[in-house]
């Protein structure tokens, strides 16, 4: 699984990453967690599908320089960004358009955003002051959905010039 964390506060990103790394759904050998500041995440969304696959400049608060893909399976998204003319809801709308199977967990400290998130596809809304109790539940739901989607994708087998699609459960 590829997990993205987007928050405008670097310390908060690191705190969330440390918390997520300890969740039982995380396999430290295969799962990758990347953190992003909002401008970098927005650039990554713009770059999806771009043959170059790179953004301009170095990220300010992370070490994603060796990242080789721009698709996420789960994104933990803060909503309010200081000094930005957009928010996490705007980013999620773009994410929904480009990566429709990505599961979004909103993680914020402002309850007033709750009604607005329903204009996006997401699987959970967690208050930061309740993160220890609710983020594990949210992450479990997101990983369950991820697994369900992964299993529903058929296997493509090409043999002797013929293509056959077989459901994974078979």
Image (spheres, rainbow, N blue to C red):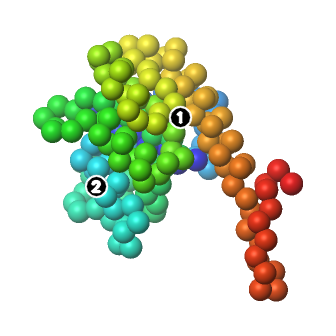
Residue 158 lies in what quarter of the image?
Answer: bottom right
- Depth check, front residue: 93 or 10: 93
Q: Which secondary structure, mark 2?
A: helix
- Depth check, front residue: 134 or 157: 157
Name the image quarter holding the C terminus.
bottom right
Q: How packed is label 2: few (under 14 Cα within 10 Å), some, or many (20 or more)?
A: few
The disc at residue 21 is 1
Residue occupying the point 28% across, 55% down = 43
Task: State how far apart marks 2 and 1 are (Cα).
Answer: 25 Å
* Residue with the most extreme bottom position: 160
Of the two numbered discs 2 and 1 on the same chain, state the one appearing first in sequence.
1
The disc at residue 140 is none
Residue occupying the point 35% across, 72% down = 52
The answer to whether residue 166 shows anywhere in this view is: yes
Q: Is residue 89 above or below residue 99?
A: above
The disc at residue 43 is 2
Residue occupying the point 50% across, 23% down = 135
Q: Is residue 163 above or below residue 122?
A: below
Q: Position of residue 82 (x, y in %)?
A: 17, 31
Residue 4 lies in what quarter of the image?
Answer: top left
Q: Which secondary structure, mark 1?
A: helix
Q: How packed is label 1: few (under 14 Cα within 10 Å), some, or many (20 or more)?
A: some
């Amino acid at each position: 699984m590829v997990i993205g964390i987007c928050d405008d506060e670097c310390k908060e990103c690191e705190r969330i990453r440390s918390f997520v790394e300890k969740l039982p759904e995380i396999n430290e050998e295969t799962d990758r967690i990347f953190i992003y500041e909002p401008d970098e995440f927005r650039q990554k969304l713009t770059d999806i599908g771009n043959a170059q696959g790179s953004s301009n400049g170095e990220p300010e608060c992370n070490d994603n320089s060796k990242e080789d893909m721009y698709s996420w399976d789960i994104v933990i998204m803060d909503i309010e960004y200081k000094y930005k003319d957009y928010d996490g809801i705007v980013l999620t709308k773009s994410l929904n358009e480009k990566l429709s199977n990505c599961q979004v967990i909103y993680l914020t400290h402002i309850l007033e955003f709750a009604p607005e998130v329903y204009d996006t596809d997401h699987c959970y809304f967690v208050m930061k002051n309740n993160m220890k109790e609710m983020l594990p539940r949210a992450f479990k739901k997101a990983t369950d959905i991820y697994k369900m989607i992964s299993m529903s994708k058929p296997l493509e087998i090409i043999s002797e010039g013929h293509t056959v699609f077989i459901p994974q459960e078979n």
